[in-house]
Image (spheres, grey):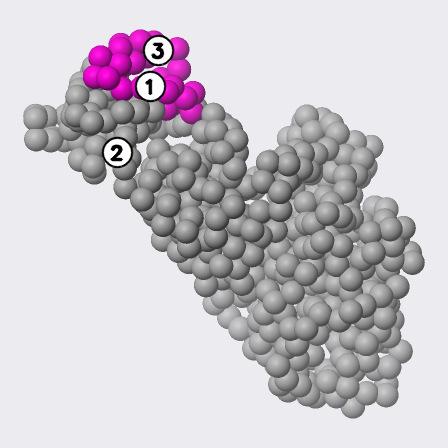
C-alpha cells in the first residue's frame, strides 16, 4: 500500500487514525486551553472521526467517489467543537481532490492536503496562527515541496509528519496563551496524531502510545475562561448565500465563528455572550437542527465547585436524567456530568461516551436511571480506556439512592458495593397516563386514564391523578418503611400534593417532595 491507494484502503487509514485519537484523547484533552475552556478537543476530534467511520459504513458503494462523499458528509454532520469543524473542512478539501481519480498517489496526496488547508483557512473568518490551521498549512507546504523527491506515499508522509511535529512544537511561540500554560495547541496535536495514524497504517507498524516530552500537558488546573460565555453548535438548513450572510452577522455577535457546508446544509459554531440574538438570527436564516448549547463559564464554575467539595476526586460520576429539578439534585449530590435522557428519549451510546470522556477521572461510575438505557451504557465500557462501572439503576429514585451511598473518599469497588446495597433498599412507583385501552388484575383500563406502576406491573388505575397516586402508595408502602420521596413531574404542575403527603405521613414516613420537572410521569415515588 505504498505507491497508490485504492478507495477501500482509505478506510484502513481512517480506522488507524481513529485508533490513534482514542489512545491520545485524554492527552489532547489536557492540552485544551484555547479557545474552549472545557478540555474536550481530543473527544471532539475522535467523535468527528467516528462519524466519518459510521458514514462510510452506511455507504452502499465503496468506489473512490462514494467513499469521498461519505467522508465529507460524515465529518460535516458529525463535527463537534471548533477543532472538529476545522477538521471536517480539511477532509472536505482533501476529498475534493481524491474524488477526481480512481487511485491516490504522492502527487494527489500532496494536492489534497494543500486543498484541505486552503478550505480550512477559508472557513475561518479570522484565522488564528498557532492552531490546527498552522499545523495543516506547514504540513501541506512540506508535502508540496518534497513530492517530486518521494517515490512512495510512505516516504512522502514521513516527511510531512516530521514537519507537522515541528510546526506543533512551535505553536506556543505563535499563541501566547499556549506559552503561558506550557502546552502546544490541542487541535494541532490531534491533527498530528491523525497523520501519525495514517503513517502507521502505511508502514504496518504499531501505533506508538508514548507521549513525547515536548508535548507538555497542563493538567486540569490549566482550565481558563475566554471572553464569551456560551458555545453554540447546530446544523442550519438554508441556501449557501444566506449562510454566508449569517456568518458575517455572527462575527458581530461573537468569536470562533465557523459556518461551513454545502448549498443546502451548514455546520455552525460560535462563541457568544448574546445567545438569544444568535438563535434569532439563525432561525430567521433557515431551519435549525442538532442544536447544542454549552455554558462555558458554568462549566468552569462547576469544576471549581467540584474541587472545593471533593478535592481532586479519583472517581467521576455520570448520570442520565431528564427534568431540570432532577438534574439540579443530582449535581448537588456530586454528579459530574448529566446526559439528557429518560423514558421515550434514550440517549445514544455516543452521547453517553462523550460524557464519560469529558470527565478528568480515569475511573467513572455511570448511572443510567432507566432500564432501556442500560444496554447503551454497558456498551461504553468497551469504547473507552477508562474503567467504567455501570450501576443497574432503572429509576431516578435508585439514582438518588446511589448518590447518597457514593463516597468520593472510597475506592471504586467499595463504592460499587455500597451503591448496589443502597439501591436494593429502594422501591419505586410512578403515575402516568395510559396510551391505549387495556386491563390489569383489578379491572379494565381506558386510554387517557391515569395508571400506577410498581415492580413492572400496573397496580392502580383511575381517572384522577391523585386517586391513582394514593392507590399506588397503598400498595407500595409496608411496615418498616421510613422515608418517601415524591418527585413531581411537569404534567402534575399546579396540582396540590397535600393528600399524597398526608397519606404518607399517616403511615409514619418522613416525606421529601422534589419538583423534578420530568415528562411522561406525573409522579415518581421512592420508598425505603
Nearest-to-viewer mark from 3 and 2: 2
Sequence-wise first label, 1 or 2: 2
**Residue 158 appears anywhere in the view:** yes
Q: Earlier in the sequence, mark 3 or mark 2?
A: 2
Is 170 contained in the magenta span? no
According to the picture, the residue beneath numbered tag 1 turns out to be 511
Percent coordinates x, y for residue 295 in the rendering: 66, 34
State the image quarter where residue 369 is shown: top left
Q: Dot 2 corresponds to which residue?
A: 427
Q: Who's the residue at 82% across and 32% down the image?
A: 252
Eyeballing the image, is 209 above or below 453? below
| Residue situated furthest front in the rendering | 409
**Going 17% across and 21% down the picture, which residue do you hit?**
474
The quarter in which the N terminus is drawn is: bottom right
Range covered by the magenta-colored residues:
487-516
In percent of width and height, residue 173 lies at 92, 58
Cβ–Cβ under 8 Å for marks 1 and 2:
no
Residue identified by numbered label 3:
495
Image x and y of residue 471, in percent: 17, 20
Amino acid at each position: 500500500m505504498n505507491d497508490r491507494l485504492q478507495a477501500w484502503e482509505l478506510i484502513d487509514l481512517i480506522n488507524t487514525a481513529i485508533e490513534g485519537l482514542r489512545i491520545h484523547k485524554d492527552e489532547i484533552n489536557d492540552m485544551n486551553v484555547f479557545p474552549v475552556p472545557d478540555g474536550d478537543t481530543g473527544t471532539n476530534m475522535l467523535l468527528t472521526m467516528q462519524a466519518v467511520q459510521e458514514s462510510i459504513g452506511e455507504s452502499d458503494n465503496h468506489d473512490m467517489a462514494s467513499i469521498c462523499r461519505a467522508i465529507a458528509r460524515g465529518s460535516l454532520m458529525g463535527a463537534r467543537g471548533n477543532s472538529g469543524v476545522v477538521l471536517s473542512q480539511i477532509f472536505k478539501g482533501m476529498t475534493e481532490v481524491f474524488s477526481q481519480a480512481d487511485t491516490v498517489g504522492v502527487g494527489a496526496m500532496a494536492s489534497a492536503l494543500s486543498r484541505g488547508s486552503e478550505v480550512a483557512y477559508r472557513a475561518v473568518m479570522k484565522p488564528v496562527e498557532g492552531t490546527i490551521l498552522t499545523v495543516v498549512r506547514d504540513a501541506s507546504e512540506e508535502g508540496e515541496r518534497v513530492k517530486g523527491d518521494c517515490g512512495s506515499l510512505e516516504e512522502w508522509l514521513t516527511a510531512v509528519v516530521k514537519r507537522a511535529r515541528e510546526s506543533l512544537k512551535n505553536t506556543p511561540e505563535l499563541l501566547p496563551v499556549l506559552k503561558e500554560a506550557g502546552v502546544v495547541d490541542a487541535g494541532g496535536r490531534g491533527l498530528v496524531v491523525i497523520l501519525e495514524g495514517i503513517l502507521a497504517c502505511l508502514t504496518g507498524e504499531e501505533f506508538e502510545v508514548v507521549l513525547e516530552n515536548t508535548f507538555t500537558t497542563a493538567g486540569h488546573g490549566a482550565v481558563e475562561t475566554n471572553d464569551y460565555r456560551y458555545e453554540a453548535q447546530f446544523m442550519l438548513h438554508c441556501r449557501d448565500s444566506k449562510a454566508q450572510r449569517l456568518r458575517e452577522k455572527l462575527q458581530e455577535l461573537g468569536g470562533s465563528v465557523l459556518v461551513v457546508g454545502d448549498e443546502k446544509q451548514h455546520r455552525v459554531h460560535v462563541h457568544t455572550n448574546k445567545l438569544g440574538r444568535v438563535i434569532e438570527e439563525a432561525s430567521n436564516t433557515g431551519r435549525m437542527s442538532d442544536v447544542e448549547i454549552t455554558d462555558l463559564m458554568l462549566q468552569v464554575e462547576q469544576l471549581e465547585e467540584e474541587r472545593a467539595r471533593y478535592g481532586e476526586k479519583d472517581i467521576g460520576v455520570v448520570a442520565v436524567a431528564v427534568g431540570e429539578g432532577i438534574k439540579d439534585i443530582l449535581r448537588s449530590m456530586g454528579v459530574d456530568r448529566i446526559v439528557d435522557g429518560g423514558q421515550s428519549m434514550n440517549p445514544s451510546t455516543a452521547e453517553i461516551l462523550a460524557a464519560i470522556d469529558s470527565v478528568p477521572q480515569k475511573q467513572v461510575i455511570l448511572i443510567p436511571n432507566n432500564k432501556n438505557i442500560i444496554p447503551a451504557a454497558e456498551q461504553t465500557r468497551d469504547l473507552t480506556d477508562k474503567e467504567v462501572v455501570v450501576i443497574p439503576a432503572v429509576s431516578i429514585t435508585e439514582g438518588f439512592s446511589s448518590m447518597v451511598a457514593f463516597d468520593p473518599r472510597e475506592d471504586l469497588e467499595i463504592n460499587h458495593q455500597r451503591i448496589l446495597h443502597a439501591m436494593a433498599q429502594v422501591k419505586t412507583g410512578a403515575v402516568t397516563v395510559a396510551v391505549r385501552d387495556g386491563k390489569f388484575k383489578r379491572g379494565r383500563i381506558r386510554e387517557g386514564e391515569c395508571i400506577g406502576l410498581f415492580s413492572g406491573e400496573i397496580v392502580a388505575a383511575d381517572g384522577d391523578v391523585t386517586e391513582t397516586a394514593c392507590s399506588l402508595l397503598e400498595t407500595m408502602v409496608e411496615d418498616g418503611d421510613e422515608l418517601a420521596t415524591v418527585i413531581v413531574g411537569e404534567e402534575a404542575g399546579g396540582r396540590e400534593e397535600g393528600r399524597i403527603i398526608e397519606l404518607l405521613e399517616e403511615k409514619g414516613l418522613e416525606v421529601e417532595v422534589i419538583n423534578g420537572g420530568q415528562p411522561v410521569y406525573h409522579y415518581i415515588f421512592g420508598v425505603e
